[in-house]
Image: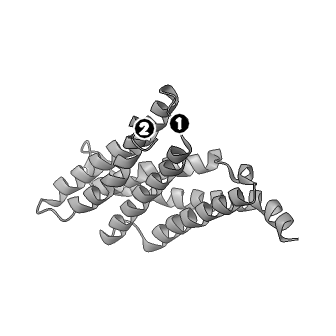
Amino acid sequence: MFLTLPTLLTWARIVAIPLIVGVFYLPLEAPTRNLIATVMFVVFALTDWLDGWLARKLNQTSSFGAFLDPVADKFLVCASLLVLVKLDRVDVLVALVIIGREIAISSLREWMAQIGASRSVAVHMLGKLKTATQMTAIPFLLYDGALFGVIDTRMWGTGLVWIATVLTVWSMVYYLQRALPEIRAKAR
C-alpha cells in the first residue's frame, strides 16, 4: 500500500516541493531558474493524473492512496503559491483565498466523513475546474517570460490565477451549501 507505483508517484509530488522551492535559491540566471521550476512543476503535476490512472489500471487503489493524493496536490499548489508570492508574481490575497479554501474544505470533508455524510461534499466538476485552472496558472507564473517568444505567461498566469480564485470561492460556497443540511441535522 505504501510502496506501490501509484503511491510512489504521489510521494514524488511531496518530495518535489522542496526541490521546486530550492531552485529559486540556486545561483542561476532568473530565466533558467524559472524554466527549471516550471518544468519540474509540470512534470510533478502530471504525476497526479498518472498515479490515479496507474492505480486503476494495476488495481492498486487504496484508502491510503486516496488520502495521500489530495494532500500531495494541496502541498504542491500551496508551496508554489507561496514561492510566487515571494517572487511578487501572485497577490497575497489570492494565495490566502486559495490556501484558506483548501484548509476549510479539507476540514469540512473530514468532519462530514466523521458524521457519515461525506457524499454531500464529494468532488464536484466545479472543484475540478478550479484545480485545472490553478494547475495551468501556476506554471505560467513560474515561467514568467515570453513562451515561444509570443505568449506573455505572466499576463496569462495572472488572469488565470484570478479566475482560479473566483472558482475557489464559488466551489467553497457550493460545498458549504451541500454540507449545510447535514450540519443543521447534526446540530439538533
Please give left or right for residue 156 compared with residue 176 in the image. left
Closer to us: 154 or 130:
130
Q: Amino acid at mark 2?
A: Pro
- Vertical position of residue 114 compared to residue 35: above or below: below
| Marks 1 and 2 close (CB-CB < 8 Å) | yes
Which residue is drawn at the image coordinates 42% and 35% (left, top)? 50
> What is the residue that sits farthest to the right in this orientation?
188
- Vertical position of residue 94 compared to residue 53: above or below: below
Query: Residue 5: x, y in percent?
Result: 39, 36
Q: Determine whether the residue tagged by mark 2 lies in a helix, strand or loop.
A: helix
In space, the residues marked 1 and 2 are separated at their CA atoms by: 8 Å
Which residue position is annotated with label 1? 61
> What is the residue that sits farthest to the top in this orientation?
57
Which residue is drawn at the image coordinates 12% and 59% (left, top)? 28
Which residue position is annotated with label 2? 6
Q: In the rendered image, which quarter is residue 145 located in?
A: bottom left
Closer to us: 50 or 117:
117
N-terminal label among 1 and 2: 2
Query: Residue 154: x, y in percent?
Result: 34, 57
